[in-house]
Amino acid sequence: MASRLNPYLNFNGSTRQALEFYASVFGGDLTLTTFADMGAQGSPDADRIMHGLLETAAGFTIMAADVTSDMSYQPPAGFAVSISGDDAGALRDYWQKLSAGGTVTMPLAKQAWGDEFGMCADQFGVPWMVNISQPQ
């Protein structure tokens, strides 16, 4: 298998909901493994997600997990998940879905460099950047 780079997001008990939301945004195949699935049936974290994987037809991969109850949770900071390309229809659709229920920090609009660009944090607090490049 070739190497790949993808985000691995952490949540505090909401990984299932977040990955189901991302599957509704991007489509794809979602696999969720709980701590109970891996032998921790009696633990307070049994229903939390130990590992989640979303793989889409567009080639996107998002992985995520819940922190355990004995770990401190740190909300996302200092990064953004970036989606870019020239499929304006698909990218605008992603933007609409990701920003709905979240916080828009920069509306999706034409920018000085000629592309459409916007930034938001989705309803789970994950920051996103969407860039729609113009046809060359």
Image (cartoon, grey):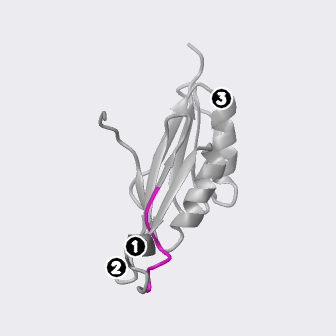
Residue 90 horizontal/vertical position (percent): 66, 34
CA separation in Å, label 1 and label 2:
6 Å
Q: Which is more foreground, mark 1 or mark 3?
A: 1
Q: Earlier in the sequence, mark 1 or mark 3?
A: 1
Q: Is residue 51 above or below residue 63?
A: below
Q: Position of residue 86 (x, y in %)?
A: 58, 25
Q: Which residues are magenta?
A: 44-52
Q: Please name the amino acid that badge 3 sits on.
A: Ala
Distance in Å between CA atoms under marks 3 and 2: 40 Å
Residues at circles 1 and 2 in contact by the CB criterion of under 8 Å: yes
Horizontal side of 110 relative to 2 (left or right) equals: right
Say which residue label 3 marks: 88
> What crowding class fits label 2: few (fewer than 14 Cα within 10 Å), some (14-19), or many (20 or more)?
few
- Between residues 20 and 78, which one lies in front from this camera angle? 20
Query: Where is mark 1, residue-wise?
Result: 67
In-front residue for pair 67/34: 34
Give the SS element for disc 3.
helix
Is 107 colored magenta in this rendering? Answer: no
Using a 10 Å C-alpha cutoff, classify the residue at mark 1 as few (fewer than 14 neighbours), some (14 to 19) or many (20 or more): many
Do the numbered discs 3 and 2 sit on residues whose CB atoms are within 8 Å?
A: no
Q: Is residue 111 above or below residue 136?
A: below
Instruction: Using the image, tell me which numbered label, if any, was put on residue 79.
Output: none
> In 3D space, how far apart are the residues under numbered discs 1 and 3 (Cα atoms)?
35 Å
Quarter that holds the C terminus: top right
Rendering quarter of residue 65: bottom left
Query: Residue 71: percent from the left, percent from the top?
Result: 34, 79
Q: Which callout, 3 or 2, points to the residue nearer the camera?
A: 2
Q: Amino acid at mark 1?
A: Val
Say which residue appears at 59% left-offset and 21% top-offset: 134
Q: Residue 71, labelled with which disc?
A: 2
Precedes in sequence: disc 3 or disc 2: 2
Q: Residues within 10 Å of mark 3 (few under 14, many from 20)?
A: some
